[in-house]
Image: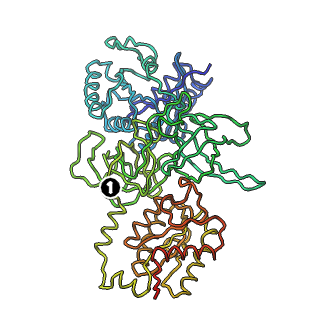
Amino acid sequence: MNREQMNIVVVGHVDHGKSTVIGRLLVETDSLPEGKLEQVRANCARNAKPFEYAFLLDALQNEQSQGITIDTARCFFKSKRRDYIIIDAPGHIEFLKNMVTGAARAEAALLVIDAHEGVQENSRRHGYMLSMLGIRQVVVCVNKMDLVGYSQDTYESIVAEYSRFLERIGIVPMAFLPLSAFFGDNLVTRSPNLPWYDGPALLERVDQFSKEKSAAEKALRFPVQDVYKFTEFGDERRIIAGRVEAGTVRIGDPVVFLPSMKEATVASIEEFNRETRGSVEAGTSIGFTLQPEIYVRPGELMVRPSSGSRGAADGADSGSEPIVGTTFRVNLFWMGRQPMIRDKKYKLKLGTVEVPVWLRKVTSVLDASDLASVANKEQVDLYDVGDCVLETFKPIAYDRIMDVAVTGRFVIVDNYEIAGGGIIVEPVAEERSLVEEHIRTRDRAWERTGITPTMRSGRYDQRSTLVVLVGSSDSSIVPIARSLEEKLFAKGRFVYYLGLSNALLGLHADVDIGRERDEFIRRLGEIAHLFTDAGTILITTVPDVDEYELQTIAALNRPGEMLVVNVGGAADRRESVGNGQTDLRLPAGVEPDEAVERITATLTRTNVLIEYNL
């Protein structure tokens, strides 16, 4: 019979005894490997070092030499009720990043406070981070009661002080509990040294934690990590790979990918060197094939269709639908050496999506140590907690933290270092996006002469237009674009083909366009605006473009016009590249001459090419 399992994180200020609490629990519940306790005691004796239960956990050599936990340690113990995975998170202020990592998957927490030292700065910070991570089951352990003579007054003073703090951040602890981990007081059984305490011991309190609904019973969340295409031996599979973070997936289930809104049905479940399965649950790294074989990108979120549709699997929780958008309110804890400032580009990582993000607004900033509010602050400094508004370059799919935690938590990367983390509270409707604000600023500063677009049109017998050829690959669209430029130039048109190399767009030659695609799209839009403002018909190619990218290019190109030619797009609008923005659809494999003829006809029909008939 499979026993219930639960993740618990232990946090607290440095030297307040977190590792000792865990080490003593391992001893008292006979959860240590045979001979481990004796081995550690003997090692301490050889080195003339006092024995510490914390040494049972410290896996890193430099941790034992310094006496502090640097990385998160995981260990296991069993009670009569269930199995536990205990995460010992760092308490030192320099290692708060590791603490956030350790607490991210916990269902409950033990927060340890030294009775002799009392509530410390990190005691408050850790409490706030537990709140931010959505952990609501908390037991506060007032440890080292032996150092204060097991004083009830000292204990109650700490309870009163920390209760007031937790109330302000929305945490109601299940209990406060006095103990002395080193001597085993109140860990597994009630201690005679604390006769004034009439509650249960720590192990009984831990068993009172409520187990969350299993991840498999929750709403489906499958972040797409990668897409694999096979071609050898007639294998035409396109496998969507990733990890099922929540829910269950069965062959035949209808699914929808966000933010693209493309729909399909799960055709098969793919694993390497393993028998085919009919379904998989949360926690499984897996691949799927789809029917039809739609094009999706890494970072998209596969979910079930909206509630009420045929998508909910038997017994599965349809749950709240993910939100798709660019702007959202967050609670953010900043750990970067440099402050988080407005108008600087950072990277947001949520699930498998990595997208540029900007700080749009600082609603309020708190000092996490005492929750003192700092007024009129325009940045988030080291160890600050910010109530902020963030905006991503393009829409992403996410959840509010209270709906689905796994897709409601994120980290912020600044210059390749994790600098912050937080939770998404709610979406925000912004009046203007970053792109729109940029365009307004750009247009206000633009210096123009008296030459108008109408004058340029009359000179060149054409309306300036950006012609974008889109398709699944460069090989299918570049020959058409080059041929179109040659044919229009031969007819005396003011035309230019923009072959998209990194150097041409001002990017470094070895820049990975896939990882810097946002900057690639932005620069393309700005360059297009220059060409069309000069009266040119500009021709360019953008393979594997999505609707939002086309919208961004079109916005940056305004007031110039844009015409989209989709080469090889499917008839189904949901699968087509560019969706509703396609002006002309050409079949896959079309010859360049035929394509140029049809594009030219479209340019003539829409009066981009002005023909005068007498």
Which one is in front, 67 or 274? Answer: 274
Identify the coloring. Answer: rainbow
Q: In this view, does 334 lie above or below 82?
A: below
Q: Where is residue 485 in the image (x, y as percent from the top left)?
A: 55, 80
In screen coordinates, is 109 left or right of 268? left
Examine the image and state in which quarter residue 577 appears.
bottom right
Q: Where is residue 203 in the image (x, y as percent from the top left)?
A: 46, 19
How many other residues sit within 10 Å of disc 1, few (<14), some (14-19) or many (≥20)? many
Q: Position of residue 300 (x, y in %)?
A: 52, 49
The residue at the point 61 percent across, 41 percent down is 285
Quadrant that contains the N terminus:
top right
Per the image, the residue denoted by label 1 is 360
Examine the image and state in which quarter residue 431 appears.
bottom left
The answer, for residue 67, to whether it is visible in the render is no
Tell how many labels. 1
The answer, for residue 41, to whether it is visible in the render is yes
Q: In this view, does 525 lie above or below 537?
A: above
Q: Where is residue 598 in the image (x, y as percent from the top left)?
A: 57, 73
The residue at the point 33 percent across, 82 percent down is 452
The residue at the point 47 percent across, 29 percent down is 8
In the rendered structure, which amino acid carries the disc numbered 1?
Answer: Arg
Of all residues, the one furthest to the front in this rendering is: 614
Which one is in front, 539 or 381? Answer: 539
In screen coordinates, is 230 left or right of 113? right
Q: Is residue 219 above or below residue 499?
A: above
In screen coordinates, is 239 left or right of 485? right
Secondary element at image label 1: strand
Which one is in front, 340 or 370? Answer: 340
Of all residues, the one furthest to the right in this rendering is: 233
The residue at the point 50 percent across, 29 percent down is 7
Of all residues, the one furthest to the left in this rendering is: 375
